[in-house]
Amino acid sequence: MEEAPVFHPTEEEFEDSVEYIASIRPKAEAYGICRIVPPLSWQPPCLIKEKNIWEDSTFVTHIQRIDGLQNQYSQSKIARLHGNVKGKRRSLRISSKNGYSDEYTPIPYDVESFEPDHGPEFTLETFKRYADDFKCQYFCSGTKVTGPDKNSTAFQEQVEPSVEDIKGEYIRIVENPTEEIEVLCGANLDARIFCSGFPGASNSVEISGHPKYSKSSWNLNNIPKLPASLLSFESLETSHILLPQLCVGMCFSSRHWKAEEHHLYLLCYMHLGAPKIWSCVPGSYNIKFEAAMKKHFPDLLVEQPELGHMLVTEASASRLKSEGIPVYHCIQYPREFVLVLPGAYHTGFDCGFNCAEMVNFAPLDWLPFGKNAVELYREQGRKTSISHDKLLLGAAREAVRARWEVALRGNNTLDNLRWKDACGVDGVLAKSFKSRIKCEGITRKYLCKSLEKRKMSKDFDATSKRQCTVCFSDLHFSAAGCQCNPNKFSCLNHAKQFCSCSWSEKFFLFRYEMNELELIVEALEGKLSAVYRWAKEDLGLSLYSPASKSGTRKSGLVGGLPSHAEESKQKQHKSKDVGKPVGIGTNSTSSIKAEIKARLLQYKMINELKAKDIPVESKYAATRSSINSISESAIEIERKAHMLQSTMLNKPKEKDYTKVSTVVSSARGDEDATSFLQTRVIFEVSSESTSLSSSSESADEISDPVF
């Protein structure tokens, strides 16, 4: 098999995990998988080696039968035809002094079930001894060793097989087994319950001892909730995907072919132990891969189609290659990452005792893959693990906030620019949201004319996942309900089928009206008036506010904008308007256009000031008294700007524009937040000029700025 690419980021490149992964994605996507070797300075603590975890924390293992993995489903079918006969498995005899018996009793192998059988309970310490003894006995079974030299370092080095030897033996066992082989593994251990290998926010001692790594964007506890990850809009109450999982393996312990749920990214970090060998089919071949599986294992996907994402069989690379499907592999060593890209099928096995940690995440470029996964799940009648619509809407609202800050505040932070890049007519977020809203609009148009319409509570799916009882579709945007059961809902398409009540007893729930969702689309595509309107009415943001007596802004305005990170911590926006889907937009579009146009004209005049080398005091935007330090020509240019605006608006009545007031910045002392105001010297539109801007007929003639 061809090797997958290996990347060696510099320390500077390694600072931002999401940014770096985005930079290597074009090269790695063709392989479906890649290996990332951190800089030498990356030395995170391995908390699972702490005494209280290594020696005291226990986990339940799963039993895996390795021989004949390719034929196990066929055997299960034969067993059913002969009265569901259950065969017995035997394991290699393992000897050890502590932690487990000389030979555990084989557990009946239920070939009818796809669920793994439970094995003995271990600590990491005792499981390592078990795994080391198994590997030692297996690869030196022809040599009897007795006496004190058995446990010596020289002996261990002598019998330690190479990675290629282990790989060759594994392929032989799977494809041409001559004996029955059973191994154990600790798979999918919840990092919250057992332990994460990384320091996390749940333990203050861990953070104080390792602040660099507890906050690192490569810490798997942090990745799902990073500002650039769409999973940050999900909650632990409704989705298990946000949690990292530990996997403890031994020689030959395996993972079946699998595509990640919702075709999410997967990032795996190996804390310690023997290498892990991965094989992968790129996401661009996943349809062809599934077709090949149906061809060679036709009954598997016919009888249980929901297993398509987690195929309980081991299709060999040679068989897949014969179908024209490329298979790439990589070998992961301790302190290295492996990245699996969206939609890729992957499998693998371990070369000995090891402990790895993995987690899913979803950057913005995942959106098209997530959409395809949701459509596939709907066809299969399969439950979803996350609310795709919740992620999409949360990302859209955050992107509008970022566009507001960039365009109207000049707050060009990395996170804001990242969101801005996903917008625009061709932006991945704008296109994904527009496509979803188009489908929602068609459904509502043809199905929702006759029933009662109600406002969906913002907490409708905050603590529990809401899905259609018929097709398991996501119900974040809209739902159909009935008087007969307040906790039973369906999607709009199955409003008639989900209960037997009469049509008149049913009703529809809408989180937002269609005109409000379409306003978000316009804002994402770049209409400045739409950005301004949504930010003001839904997010509670304001371009300016009158100065208070103390010289500070009102809370919740420019000086105290609620970022997405703050929202995650507070679980709600500070604005009283958040989550109200009805009544957005009290100002007319024309007045908003006129107000924004006034701002743009003012910016232009200020640039003329700079071009003429007219000095502007650095604190002019911070205090009212500094306005006197501006030359008379500056006031004259400002007056001309307002007069020019008046001419464009065709307002016959002349106004006095010499009366201006400065925009007073927040007293929070944030230089980044006020730099835009300081450099451009924004003037607040007086009450008279604001009333002038509200002429709807003239304002409609002003083109809506798109940025």
Image (spheres, rainbow, N blue to C red):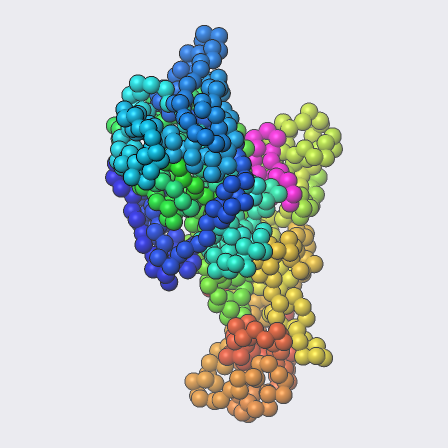
Taking the view exactly as shown, the residue that stands out farthest to the top is 82
Q: Is residue 464 magenta?
A: yes
Relative image position of residue 477 (x, y in whole percent): 60, 44
Relative image position of residue 475 (x, y in whole percent): 60, 39
Residue drawn at x 53%, y 84% as measured from the top left: 618
Provide the residue span drawn in magenta. 461-477
Relative image position of residue 91 (x, y in whole percent): 41, 22
Image position of 106 (left or right of 159): right
Labels in figure, total: 0
Front residue of 507 and 627: 627
Task: Please identify the quarter of the rendering in which residue 57 is found.
Answer: top right
Q: Is residue 539 magenta?
A: no
Image position of 109 (left or right of 345): right
623, above or below 356, in the image: below
590, above or below 395, in the image: below
Residue drawn at x 71%, y 27% as measured from the top left: 502
Front residue of 524 and 547: 547
Front residue of 366 and 522: 366
- Quadrant containing the N terminus in the rendered view: top left
Image position of 266 (left or right of 284): right
Asked whether the viewer can see residue 284, the reply is: no
Residue drawn at x 29%, y 34% as measured from the top left: 159
481, above or below 49, in the image: above
